[in-house]
Image: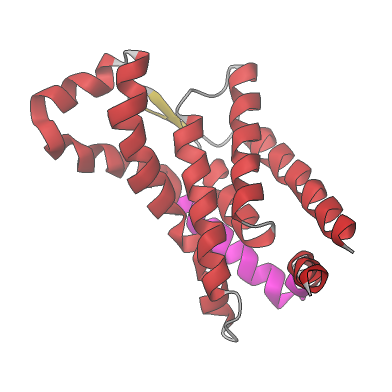
Amino acid sequence: MMEVGVAKRVAFLALFTALGVMIAPFFWFQFLATKAFPGQHLVNGLAGVIIGPWWAGLAAVFIGVIRNMLGIGTVYAFPGGIPGAIVVGLAYKLTRRSRNRLIRYSAALLEPVGTVIIGGTLSLFLVAPLMGHTRLTDPLAEMGLAFLPIFWAGWAASSVPGAVISYVVLLALDRMGVMPHIEVVERVQRSAQT
């Protein structure tokens, strides 16, 4: 039974990776030294709910690697994608048993917590200095922590729309009756443990 669950997760991992890479060239905007990809956050919201936190984080890694190899991403794809996917997956573990579908899939709306607060902070204080990106480090040196909310706002401009779109897509899939079939992945895992 466990192989079926793993096979479905791998299939969804490939699907989400392909989706993230496919929409990246068309759905992005420049923000300081970073490129903002709302499509990544859409994928994070879907993947976190459907395949769980660690697999969704792995999808974000694969999308970041491929985007960078194709020259359509930056090093900020990693701190900007991975934490959001993991936060959604962990939050869904708390909300998935809710009978109210609006609450059940609200975990997707927490994607900006991982991306903006965790990923944005890591990017500003760790990645930007390591990469020597003065467009990010100079304002930080001049303004101190006052620059952090300004930086977060730029990341939120990418993350929030992607999270909202993923929430709407999850609700639509649930309304069409698709989500119970997708959530079999979680049921297979639980039945294999018993």
Q: Would you say residue 182 is visible in this rendering?
A: yes
- Quarter of the figure with the C terminus: bottom right
- Dominant secondary structure of the residues highlighted in magenta in the image: helix
In front here: 38 or 78? 78
- Quarter-of-image position of residue 98: bottom right
> What residue appears at the point 44 percent right and 60 percent down from the top-left corner?
110
Image coordinates of residue 74 in percent, x first then y, are 49, 23
Magenta span has 166?
yes
When the figure is inspected, residue 50 is found, relative to residue 148, above or below; the finding is below
Looking at the image, the residue that sits furthest to the front is 194
**Vertical order, 136 against 186 (above or below):** above
**Residue 79 appears left or right of 16:** left
Residue 94 colored in magenta in the image: no
Vertical arrangement, residue 194 with respect to residue 169, above or below: below
* Total numbered labels placed on residues in the image: 0
| Res 157 seen here | no
* Residue range of the region highlighted in magenta in the rendering: 161-180
Q: Give how far across and how far down residue 18 sits, in percent.
A: 73, 38
Check the picture and name the quadrant holding the N terminus.
bottom right
User: Which residue appears at 57% of the width and 22% of the height?
Assistant: 72
Figure colour scheme: secondary structure
